Image: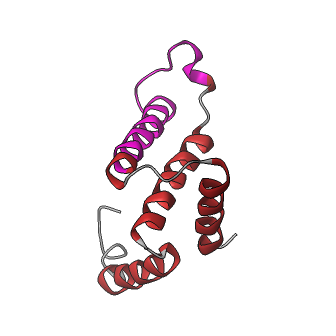
Amino acid sequence: MEIKEAQKMVDNWIKENGVRYFNELTNMALLTEEVGELARIMARKYGEQSFKGKEESANMADEMADVLWVLICLANQTGTNLEEALKRNMEKKTRRDKHRHKENKKL
């Protein structure tokens, strides 16, 4: 699936199953919440923290999809073409970092 297709799919879902998009500020808060839920799983799976009770069955892929969903909602609401934005961002990173990481002795 291309990113533009994902943006259209989310928009169609909102129109068919939702009432409307939550406002941008609400979605920004929801994005923060979803990133926090993903961070909780990551800290327990890859970090020093341990799972509590039912947490161990937490689905990391589902939490990543939740993050992507809300990010796509924000993009749709603000008229952002994520596919083009990602292409421009990759070009920027390539110009800026083409040699930086390879020359980093820490890596």
The answer to whether 55 is drawn above or below residue 13 in the figure is above
Residue that extends furthest to the top in the rendered view of this protein: 53
90 and 11: which is toward the camera:
11
Residue 53 is inside the magenta segment: yes
Is 60 placed left or right of 78 in the picture? right
Residue 81 is inside the magenta segment: no
Quarter of the image for the C terminus: give it: bottom left
**Residue 91 x %, y %:** 41, 85
In which quarter of the view is residue 8 placed? bottom right
Residue that extends furthest to the front in the rendered view of this protein: 19
Task: Tell me which residue sits at (36%, 44%) in the image.
Answer: 32
23 and 46: which is toward the camera:
23
Task: Tell me which residue sits at (52%, 55%) in the image.
Answer: 68
Residue that extends furthest to the right in the rendered view of this protein: 1
**Residue 104 x %, y %:** 29, 70
What coloring was used for the rendering? secondary structure
99 and 39: which is toward the camera:
39
Quarter of the image for the N terminus: give it: bottom right
Is 103 placed left or right of 7 in the picture? left
How many labels sit on residues? 0
Task: Tell me which residue sits at (61%, 42%) in the image.
Answer: 62
In which quarter of the view is residue 47 placed? top left
By secondary structure, the bulk of the magenta-drawn segment is best described as helix
Task: Tell me which residue sits at (48%, 66%) in the image.
Answer: 76
Is 107 placed left or right of 65 in the picture? left
The answer to whether 95 is drawn above or below residue 9 in the figure is below
**Residue 21 x %, y %:** 48, 53
**Residue 69 x %, y %:** 54, 53
The magenta span reads: 28-56
